[in-house]
Image (spheres, rainbow, N blue to C red):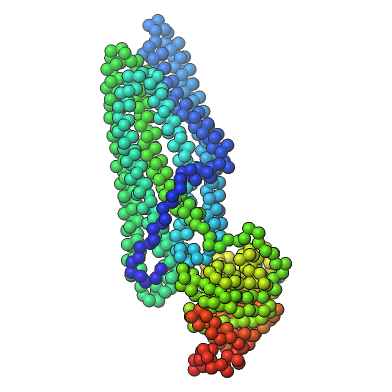
Amino acid sequence: MSLFRKKEEQPSDVHYEGNVLLRMLSYMKPHRKTMLLCLALVLAITALELYKPVIIGNAIDRYITGAAPGEQTAQRFRGLLMEAAKYTAVLLTLFVCNRVQYLLLQATGQKIIYEIRNQVFTHVERLSMRFFDLTPVGKIVTRVTNDVEALNELYANILVKLFKNIVKILGLAAVMLLLDVRMALYSFILVPVVVCLTVVFKNISRRAYQMTKTKVTALNTFLSENISGMKVIQIFNREKEKYEEFCGKSEELYRANYREMMVFAIFRPAIYLVSVAALVIVIARGSYDVFHAVLSYGTMYIFIQYINSFFEPIQELAEQFSTLQSAVASAEKIFTLLDEKPLLYDPEKPAQLPRIRGRIEFKHVWFAYDGEDYILKDVSFVIEPGQKVAFVGATGAGKSSILNLIGRYYDIQKGEILLDGVDIRTLTRDQIRGAIGQVQQDVFIFTGDINSNIRLRNEAIGDEAIRRAAEEVNASRFIEKLPMGYQEKVSERGATFSAGQRQLLSFARTLAFDPTILILDEATANIDTETEQWIQEALETLMAGRTTIMVAHRLSTIQHADQIIVMHKGRIRERGTHQELLEQDGIYRKLYQLQLA
């Protein structure tokens, strides 16, 4: 996406076609024993909550309004104390059950989120480079962080609470019908209204949550791109324009959040209004029956408590539906990413090379990133083990594409690429890339220290190997001058180092892995004269015994190559040594003379 494009809509996410809820529930299978225990606790908690009003209602009928005329006050008081003790025991049991259930749910929810987050990141690592060419970084970050975290509340609370509230509603309805069918039917008069409101709210809230998630992704993508490109923004003095663009995207997110809030703000008061109306009906009808001795005071109390409790779980269900819709919207985006298929696969029964010698052969290779817009057209060449071969040509000629194909970051459409006489599509990518060390023009340095940037978490590379690699590429000359040497902290992208120092670290990183094939992609393009001299001093040692492939615009760096291949519009136009190509009076000679001029 262009950095200075005035306005561009983010591509909408592909709608997930599968059953989201079933797939979300599948993550609970390894924890089903814990979840069953939690559900059993829910049943116990619900039963105890239903029993609480009954205790008080019975106490009213037996020891207050319904006491026998000759019954002594002391007896009635003892009876009330017994009911109070029973009520206290129920409260303590509820506390223990709720506490155990909460701890189990939170621990299980965190485990599930941990598993999902690891699964998403592992899947992203397996995706082909083409996916990253087309997908903004901010979008991927949103999936791994915001969207995964949105599922936390679902697994830790919502699913069990949904079950609890549904059981509670059914339990309340059953007990009310057992106590007094007529009063229960009066209580249920407004239930159809609640059902209609809930169905409408469910449909509207889902669309609102999907819109909010899409806008969050768009804002994160914008921030990721523009913070990374902040230096360019400041160089061209475009802060004001970028701020206006940010305000536009922020306002879109604000409006989406506002719509979401309004849906909820209308629904919950509507449910509350219905619950008040139902309570008025119960009190009115119950009072009439009490006055006519049809209904006891205790039963009247139980119904009043139950009608409050009856609409409370419905209101909670509304809140939980909101969280559930948010989780479903996030899950759709996560599962869409997880269902993204890699373009490259390792063979089921890969060939095995006992030792890669480094012979590379392209046989009539045709390659295009998209469709039939071929970047390489019928390219054939052979690089023998230990040879030093350079590719030159204008931008877009296909030089870097050849390097990407050797590491099998993309697959070709026609022809063959052979490594030691074996088609690389029959080898595993790990075996291919384990034999290749690549130094690129744009060096990426990770946050950490110098040791970790050279080792890249490969514990087989010891500190001594790191120092030896740094010495061979002359990186030790600046590393050892740092206050903490190889333990010196490195900021994001190595911002505190010069371009030359970052490139030297990249060389040390490559050599520490001791590759058979060395690829230098414009490796000296951003190096100052002094640093380039350090690298040139090391290159002869580095390339000895290794198949070396170089891409360079500066022809002075490749004059001693065993073979130079000139690319033009995806085809090989010339090949030979430096001197042979100068004598041909072709493209290479013109490029050389142009650089001399």
Instruction: Give coordinates of residue 154: x percent, y percent.
Output: 46, 44
In the displayed structure, does residue 80 sit left or right of residue 474? left
Residue 18 in sight in this render: yes
Residue at 57% x, 83% y is 565
In the displayed structure, does residue 500 sit left or right of residue 303? right
**Which quarter of the figure has residue 57?**
top left
| Residue that sits furthest to the top in the current view | 70
Instruction: Give coordinates of residue 282: x percent, y percent.
Output: 30, 24
In the displayed structure, does residue 276 sit left or right of residue 12? left
| Residue that sits furthest to the right in the current view | 354
> Of residues 468 and 443, which is closer to you in this image?
443
Measured along the vertical axis of the image, is residue 21 above or below residue 369?
A: above
Measured along the vertical axis of the image, is residue 484 above or below residue 381?
A: above
Residue at 60% x, 92% y is 579
Instruction: Give coordinates of residue 80: x percent, y percent.
Output: 44, 17
Residue 469 in sight in this render: no
